[in-house]
Image (cartoon, helix red, strand yellow):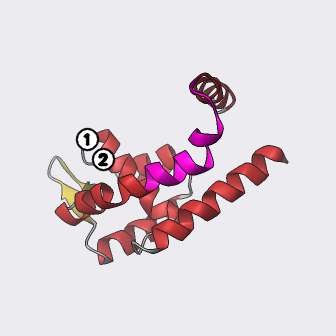
Amino acid sequence: MTLYKTNHHLVQQLEEQLGKFDLTLGRWCVLVALKSSGRAMVPSELSDDLAVTRANISNLLNSLELAGRIRRSFDPENRRRTLVNLTPEGHEIILDFWPVYEKTIDQNVGSKLTLEEQKQLETLLKKIGK
């Protein structure tokens, strides 16, 4: 229950800040996944990476495309595949929101833990997340 409550609180704090940027946590995660990969991704890769259903990723991509933050195009090597890329607007929203994201995480996690505790938490979360 502690893990659930902690996650729920953090998600609420992030969602409150994300709303000011016309984002949801799901949309933010898609943008960050694309930025982190450094390349175009197919929707199924994003779905697997974010552990969401194919239908959910499709809805997230639709809303991000409508907002001009991602672009979908056909793979030139395999026209049956769709590639997803960040647009300049997508890159810009990441740059705009990143300081807010970091501040929110720091206020709700980082400032409450020592540096050693933060490293321990990261190690433990990676261990149980596998």
Left or right of 72 on screen, residue 36: right
* Image coordinates for residue 19, horizontal then vertical, percent: 48, 73
Q: Which residue is drawn at 38% across and 66% down?
A: 61
Left or right of 30 on screen, residue 15: right
Q: SS of the residue at dot 2? A: helix
Asked if the residues shown at circle 2 and circle 1 are in contact, with their CB atoms under 8 angstroms apart, the answer is yes
Q: Is residue 45 above or below residue 79?
A: above
Q: Which mark is residue 38?
A: 1
Q: Is residue 58 above or below residue 30?
A: below
Query: Could you tell me the amino acid type at mark 1?
Result: Gly
Q: Is residue 105 magenta?
A: yes
Is 110 in front, or is 5?
110
> In the picture, which quadrant includes the C terminus?
top right
* Image coordinates for residue 124, horizontal then vertical, percent: 67, 26
Q: In which quarter of the image is residue 94?
A: bottom left
- Res 119 seen here: yes
Q: Mark 2 points at which residue?
A: 35
Main secondary structure found in the magenta portion: helix
Q: Give the range drawn in magenta.
A: 101-115
- Farthest residue, direction left: 76
Q: Residue at x 77, y 50 (%)?
A: 4
Q: Quadrant of residue 2?
A: top right
* Image coordinates for residue 110, horizontal then vertical, percent: 57, 39
Left or right of 81 on screen, residue 52: right
Mark 2 vs mark 1, CA separation in Å: 5 Å
Query: Could you tell me the amino acid type at mark 2?
Result: Lys
Q: Residue at x 21, y 59 (%)?
A: 74
